[in-house]
Image (cartoon, grey):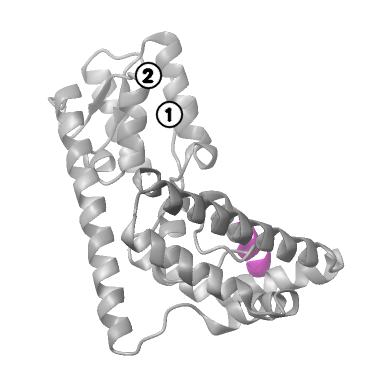
Amino acid sequence: MEAQREQIENFCQGNNFDLKGFYSEAMSGTKADRPKLQEALELCKLSDAVLVVAKIDRLTRDLHFLTKLQKEGVRFVAVDNPHANETMLQVMISFAQMENKLRSTRIKEGMRKAKEKGKKFGTDNLNIYWKQLEREIDTEGRIPIVRNRLQELLEVHPDPESAPAEVQEEVRELREEEAAFIQRVRNRKAEIPSQVRSHQALERARLLHPIVKECQADGATSFRKLAQCLTDKGIKTPLGRDVWSAGNVQTLMKQLDKIEE
């Protein structure tokens, strides 16, 4: 970080730029997870300043960063490639989007082949608690039927809004039934004493720690990317959902910090 700061300072001095501030982000993620980046962008907008980054690859590997720059209309310059401009930014966004799609396709294809060979995804220790709660609430076994039917419909109609009216209606009803069930699970969880819930959360975080490390080793260094990695691995969220958000990961990282204290 110090080396990058020195590069930026030397660049600004050599180009007669007035360096208004230096912002560094330990971990990138969504807007809520990246206050320093947001501060830098706001300063640039307010003062019509140029955002200076040390390395162009800082942009090329982060689609969120790229689209944020474009959306805010902030001018930028990279120390190691000062000729990069807005046109190049658009090209970088296109390549980053394509790379994300290819990565997602590779992951899904790899998981499909692994499942065909009998591999199971997810962590049983993490899912047992939710399965037990679901069994206690769904005594007739209705929810697995709902979820399987919903999956069948979405495989045939990935965009249900363009499907026939009867399909749209069935998808809507199934989603409402699943949402109502999830709310019942949440309510049951809320009945557990807070001290017990806190202990359970820390125990769950401890189980997730090696999985998080594995994701980080694979390049998932932001909350957003960690969320995608955990989702791809089939890990349930604290509320039993299949898809992780950056906010879920942020809470998890705070719990891991407590464990390491």
Q: Residues within 10 Å of mark 1 (few under 14, many from 20)?
A: few
Residue 205 percent location from the top left of the image: 62, 70
The quadrant where residue 19 appears: top left
**Which residue is denoted by mark 1 in the rendering?**
22
4 vs 16: above or below: below
Task: Specify the quadrant that holds the C terminus.
Answer: bottom right
Main SS of the magenta segment? helix
Residue 128 percent location from the top left of the image: 63, 82
Return the mark for residue 19: 2
Tag 2: amino acid: Leu
Question: Which element type, helix, strand or loop, lies under badge 2?
Answer: loop
Q: Residues within 10 Å of mark 2 (few under 14, many from 20)?
A: some
At x 19% / y 47%, what residue is drawn? 98
Q: Is residue 190 left or right of residue 240?
A: right
129 vs 95: above or below: below
CA distance for labels 1 and 2? 8 Å
Magenta residues span 254-261
Q: Are discs 1 and 2 less than 8 Å apart at CB?
A: yes
Tag 1: amino acid: Phe
Residue 105 visible? The answer is yes
- Residue 215 inside the magenta-drawn segment: no
The quadrant where residue 57 appears: top left
Q: Is residue 34 left or right of residue 92?
A: right
At x 63% / y 68%, what residue is drawn? 260
Residue 50 percent location from the top left of the image: 31, 18
Q: Is residue 62 left or right of residue 143?
A: left
